[in-house]
Image: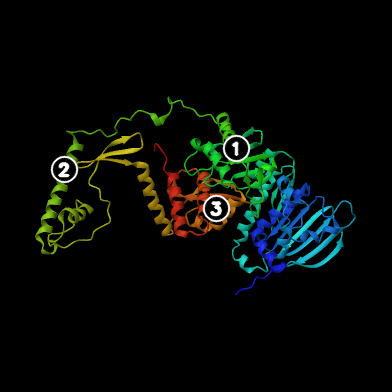
């Protein structure tokens, strides 16, 4: 019988670290939130190799008392709460006292901190959870913490880390969101010696949004505001034109805490439903302020999920706020006078002439088809080898492969059957609404969606060019320069070989910026920026589990959809 063992502190800390510290961005999130709670106005984050080699956070907060330096790394040691009742009135981002102990247990950590009451600071070095030294040190007011060799003693966790560039993108994303929630704080992110993020702490929310998301998004957002007795919601929502194929540009903050909540996202998307196309998600930044006693933030180790006491109230509050803002900010015109979509049926371009050449040519083709079929049917029936064949099914299918060319010659030898579309000869009657081609056969009327047919033709041609490495690219007169966020840029870097083989010539044009110089000729005139962002959103939804062939197919599908325009 197995006996019950009490785990030692080193083992229990490593297990706890697996819940709190998922990857490098978790370390950055916990440490930066500590800096925010400490009242810092300037926070500098330095990372190397996506944070796996080194993470260094420097702030100008109130620092740690020298006598509390060692206590800070004990499990469940915190200055944020004193007893269980404080859990229901939390106003800080951190409160459990698990982060520092967990981080120190799986890395080599050095911390230097000075409180304004002292003329000197205190330095502590911890390797793998063991304190190596504690000493006095010269330092400015605030805290400097350096985390090196993350997961060096937990090799199993290292296997789950993504590429350094991808890990850096995740860190950049969380820094962006923390900067949005704290526009009065200056954030600087330095990745491998290069400044990637640098907000200025001007306390101007719009300036922060413009810096993080760019001018295009900043010019297409609508303010929202709604207040109730127990909660209020403020923030911004984006117009439909800046919607994306993923939910990456959606941020929700509850009492300035960044969270992920499907219920709130659903409320926004429900209010937006009639204004968005399928598979598009709105841009929004929401700040929900609510009394702390009506939420529970202690439901997830990373504190990214919370529970509301009354979810229906929050859903209705968010839905009404967004819906009211849409009605005020987005004007939809219902003037049909100039709307081409309700234009009267256009006159048939090629009228059916019952006595002219069109009718005679169609009649001759049908007679030829009938004669060929009768001839093939008789040939099949007279040959002993084909007595058991169902003439009405198999023979008809064979003949329809090419109704004009003999499939079975007079010597009863079956010739090579080509993969030809099984269409009888069609006579084009005209075009309806610049969208559908009308044609007639022997007894049937054919309505062909010309855009779907065109898209299919382009897709097959494009895929063949990709498979044969013969994609022809056209040089753009003016290169399209796109400034991407961390997540989009990381996705491009991970798939740049796929873009190259698909006919895109793209160059790095600076930090998180690319220049598109060539696109495939098969696409013709397209909106390159929109197409490229849609492709990135599509690739991000795949993750890393899809094969290269699947990614090529989806790039080709999206590209061909962009190439086929209405009313062509």
- Pick out the residue farthest to the left: 382
> Left or right: 471 with respect to 377?
right
Q: Position of residue 492 (x, y in %)?
A: 56, 54
Q: Position of residue 172 (x, y in %)?
A: 65, 52
- What residue is drawn where x is 16% and y is 63%? 413
- Between the C-alphas of marks 3 and 2, the distance is 54 Å
Q: Nearer the viewer, residue 5 or 482?
A: 5
Point out the tag, 1 or 3, that comes first from the N-terminus: 1
* Residue 337 visible in image: yes
Which of discs 2 and 1 lies nearer the camera? The answer is 1
Q: Is residue 155 above or below residue 321?
A: below
Please give the count of numbered marks on the rendered protein.
3
Residue 398's disc number: none
Residue 127 figure quarter: bottom right
Asked if the residue at tag 2 contacts the one at tag 3, i.e. Cβ–Cβ closer than 8 Å, the answer is no
The residue singled out by tag 3 in the image is 506
Residue 313's disc number: 1
- What residue is drawn where x is 45% and y is 48%? 559
Query: Circle 3: is it few (<14), some (14-19), or many (20+) Cα within 10 Å?
Result: some
Q: Which SS class for mark 2?
A: helix
Which of discs 1 and 3 lies nearer the camera? The answer is 1
The residue singled out by tag 2 in the image is 364
> Left or right: 204 with respect to 363?
right
Point out the tag, 3 or 2, that comes first from the N-terminus: 2
């Amino acid at each position: 019988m197995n006996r019950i063992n009490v785990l030692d502190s080193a083992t229990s800390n490593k297990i706890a670290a697996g819940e709190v510290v998922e990857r490098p961005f978790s370390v950055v999130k916990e440490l930066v939130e500590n800096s925010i709670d400490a009242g810092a106005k300037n926070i500098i984050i330095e990372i190397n190799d996506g944070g796996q080699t080194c993470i260094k956070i420097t702030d100008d907060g109130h620092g740690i008392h020298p006598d509390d330096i060692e206590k800070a790394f004990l499990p469940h040691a915190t200055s944020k709460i004193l007893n269980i009742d404080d859990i229901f009135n939390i106003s800080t981002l951190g409160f459990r006292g698990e982060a520092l102990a967990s981080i120190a247990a799986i890395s080599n950590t050095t911390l230097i901190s000075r409180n304004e009451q002292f003329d000197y600071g205190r330095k502590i070095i911890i390797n793998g959870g063991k304190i190596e030294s504690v000493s006095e040190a010269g330092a400015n007011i605030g805290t400097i913490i350096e985390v090196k060799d993350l997961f060096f003693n937990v090799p199993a966790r290292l296997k789950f880390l993504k590429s350094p560039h991808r890990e850096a993108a995740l860190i950049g994303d969380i820094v962006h969101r923390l900067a949005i929630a704290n526009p009065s704080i200056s954030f600087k992110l330095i990745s491998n010696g290069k400044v990637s993020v640098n907000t200025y702490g001007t306390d101007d929310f719009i300036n922060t949004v413009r810096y993080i998301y760019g001018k295009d998004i900043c010019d297409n957002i609508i303010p929202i505001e709604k207040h109730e007795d127990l909660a209020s919601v403020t923030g911004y929502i984006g117009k439909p034109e800046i919607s994306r194929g993923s939910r990456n540009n959606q941020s929700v903050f509850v009492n300035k805490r960044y969270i992920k909540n499907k219920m709130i996202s659903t409320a926004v998307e429900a209010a937006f439903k009639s204004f968005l196309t399928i598979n598009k998600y709105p841009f929004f930044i929401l700040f929900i302020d609510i009394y702390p006693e009506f939420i529970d933030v202690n439901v997830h180790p990373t504190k990214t999920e919370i529970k509301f006491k009354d979810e229906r109230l929050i859903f209705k509050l968010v839905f009404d706020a967004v819906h009211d803002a849409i009605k005020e900010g987005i004007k939809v015109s219902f003037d049909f006078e100039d709307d081409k979509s309700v234009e009267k049926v256009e006159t048939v371009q090629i009228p059916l002439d019952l006595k002219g050449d069109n009718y005679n040519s169609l009649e001759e083709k049908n007679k030829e088809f009938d004669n060929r079929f009768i001839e093939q049917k008789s040939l099949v029936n007279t040959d002993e080898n084909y007595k058991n064949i169902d003439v009405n099914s198999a023979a008809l299918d064979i003949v329809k492969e090419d109704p004009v060319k003999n499939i079975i010659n007079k010597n009863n030898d079956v010739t090579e059957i080509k993969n030809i579309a099984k269409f009888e000869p069609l006579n084009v009657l005209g075009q309806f609404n610049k969208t559908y081609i009308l044609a007639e056969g022997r007894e049937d009327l054919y309505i062909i969606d010309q855009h779907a047919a065109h898209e299919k033709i382009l897709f097959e041609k494009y895929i063949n060019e990709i498979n044969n490495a013969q994609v022809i690219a056209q040089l753009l007169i003016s290169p399209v320069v796109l400034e991407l966020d961390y997540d989009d840029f990381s996705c491009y870097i991970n798939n740049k070989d796929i873009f190259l083989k698909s006919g895109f010539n793209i160059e790095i044009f600076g930090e998180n910026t690319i220049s598109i110089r060539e696109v495939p000729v098969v696409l013709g005139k397209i909106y390159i920026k929109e197409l490229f962002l849609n492709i990135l959103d599509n690739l991000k939804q795949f993750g890393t589990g899809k094969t290269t062939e699947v990614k090529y197919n989806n790039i080709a599908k999206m590209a061909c959809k962009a190439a086929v325009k209405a009313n062509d």
